[in-house]
Amino acid sequence: MDRRALTGFIIGSVVILAYYMFFLPWMFPPEKYPGPRAVKAPKHAPVKAPQPSRPTIETPVETEQMVLTTLPSTGVQPVDNMVLENEVLKTVWSNRGATLTNATLKKYKDYTGKELRLLLPSKTVPHTLAIDGILGKYDLSNHLYQVKEVTPGRISFQTTLEDGLRLTKNISLRNGTNYHIDVEILLENIADKEIPLRYSIVAASQISLEGIPEYDMASVMGVSLGTKTKLIQKTLGDLQKSPEINESHGIIWAGGVNKYFACVLKPTASDLIYSVTSRQTSGKRAKQGANLEVSVETGSLSLLPGGTDKHEYLLFVGPKREEILQEYGLVKLLNFGAFTPISKGLLHILKAFYSMIPNYGVDIIILTFLVKALLFPLTRKSQMSMLKMQKLQPQLKQLQEKYKNDKKRMGQEQMALFKKQGVNPMTGCLPIVLQLPIFYALFRTLQLSFEMRQAPFALWIDDLSRPDMLYTMSSPLPFLGDHINALPVIMALASIVQMRLMPSNPDPKVQQQQQLMKYMPIMFAFILYHMPSGLLLYWTVSTILSVGEQLLIRRMVAKLK
């Protein structure tokens, strides 16, 4: 190995070490997470008199005097474990804050085999649908409401504030396979004077963990841009330092998501939400670590004596499956990044295969064959060009010797020779270049699409969204963790065979690059070691097929001689 190749190998090794020391701990953090920054300020500024145009809400000032207070609930007893249930959703309610304390998705399992609980318990963080600010001075998160009605499909909570405001919160869950809860908030002025107000309600709180919390758990909001909806997303990592307040015009829904599920509050009136506050919270149990709370605040309104105002919401609590999200106008939650159109196209292809062969592992293999078949003409042209380059090596060496003192002329003569022989040095890169968008899009698809969650393939691979984990060790090893994953090793071995079959290039610079590329399979095995097994399955099968392609093309060239 020459000096340049050795230098490249050392640099690659340093990159791998940096990856495992800095990037990997961020992707796979320990169970305990730092709590949020202490915030003394309340979430709401004092209520101003209503204006004819959209008012400006001042940023809260950090002062102890503005902290919201909790009203006493004289004579009201706590009532927990009120249940509303349909075929797919089981919800549990409490009159402490008139909140949703538990939402179980009956058709899905967690990783222990139990029915999936989407919202985690907490005694320190407001639950979903708590009104955590009203009239600019009250926090009703733990306020005990009167329970006015409980039926199999409906619960009604009510409370009257000392300012003469009667607040009724009606909760309904329809029968069938609906993943949404109907929420109605009725505001009544029973005083003899006008009441200016606005309120803040928790759209999502304490979502269960799926994936890597720092970037798979996020606050989300949809902003209407005419005929389109823009997704604004803040990951848990973004919220580590301070809460995020967004006052964008046209906010039509907001909530929180993890990797595969969502809890989103959507008002029926498109102009009801004035701002969204997203913050990182710390669960009561240390092992729960940091979590998320998202609140939406209405604009200012005014109630005349005897006046009423009714606000209706839809609370979506369900999976991030495209067909379900489309039904609720939340399809923007499927965000695969820059190659979202390609990712969605690949997902539709996989789902089409799945309708015929209900095994996503097999479907990924079929997709790999399909991609290889489509790219085979280019691959064949690339390999043929490289083999022709090998035959031109003696002539290229003569040109290099003849024009060694005139680099420009040597380049011109080489290009003339390539043109005469029908050789294009750049065609060797085309198959790889064309595969990169597909590889990245498929990586995002297999990483984020709900269909891959807990999808088994065969043998020890029982979840295509996670590493294949052939063997679990009693003690973790450096770089590898506590699992031995087989697919990265198989991929590396296949890549080494592929490298050895690659035609050599007469260009000394290219030869140096090829020398360095011999170590790339080992580097990639380390980098991709903890990636989803579905992605490794695609890349491993693709590499094995590439070996077969090279052997086939060599036979085709031999027959032409």
Image (cartoon, rainbow, N blue to C red):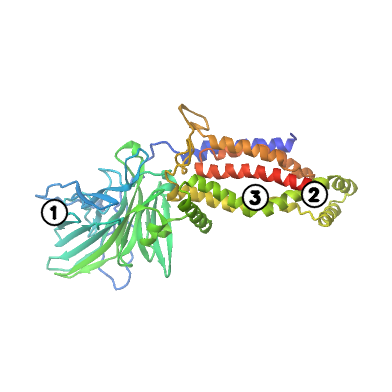
Which of the marked residues, 3 or 2, is nearer the chain's N terminus? Answer: 3
- Which residue is under mark 2? 560
Task: Kindly check if marks 1 and 2 are in contact, taking CB atoms under 8 A apart as contact.
Answer: no
Q: CA distance from mark 1 to mark 2?
A: 88 Å
At 39% across and 61% down in the image, what residue appears?
A: 326
Few, some or many residues within 10 Å of mark 3 (<14, 14–19, 20+)? few
Q: CA distance from mark 1 to mark 3?
A: 65 Å
- Observer-nearest of 386 and 297: 386
In the rendered structure, which amino acid carries the disc numbered 2? Answer: Leu
Q: Quadrant of residue 289?
A: top left
- x and y percentages locating residue 202 in the rendered image: 29, 54
Left or right, 377 with respect to 267, comes to right
- Observer-nearest of 282 and 511: 511
Task: Kindly check if marks 1 and 3 are in contact, taking CB atoms under 8 A apart as contact.
Answer: no
Q: Quadrant of residue 214?
A: top left
Few, some or many residues within 10 Å of mark 1 (<14, 14–19, 20+)? many
- x and y percentages locating residue 150 in the rendered image: 15, 54
- x and y percentages locating residue 501 in the rendered image: 71, 40
Q: Quick check: can you spot residue 516?
A: no
At numbered mark 2, what does the secondary structure look like: helix, strand or loop? helix
- Which residue is under mark 1? 146
* Residue at the bottom extreme of this rendering: 52
Q: CA distance from mark 3 to mark 2?
A: 26 Å
| Disc number lying in front (1 or 2) | 2
At numbered mark 1, what does the secondary structure look like: helix, strand or loop? strand
Left or right, 403 with respect to 331, comes to right
* Residue at the right extreme of this rendering: 402
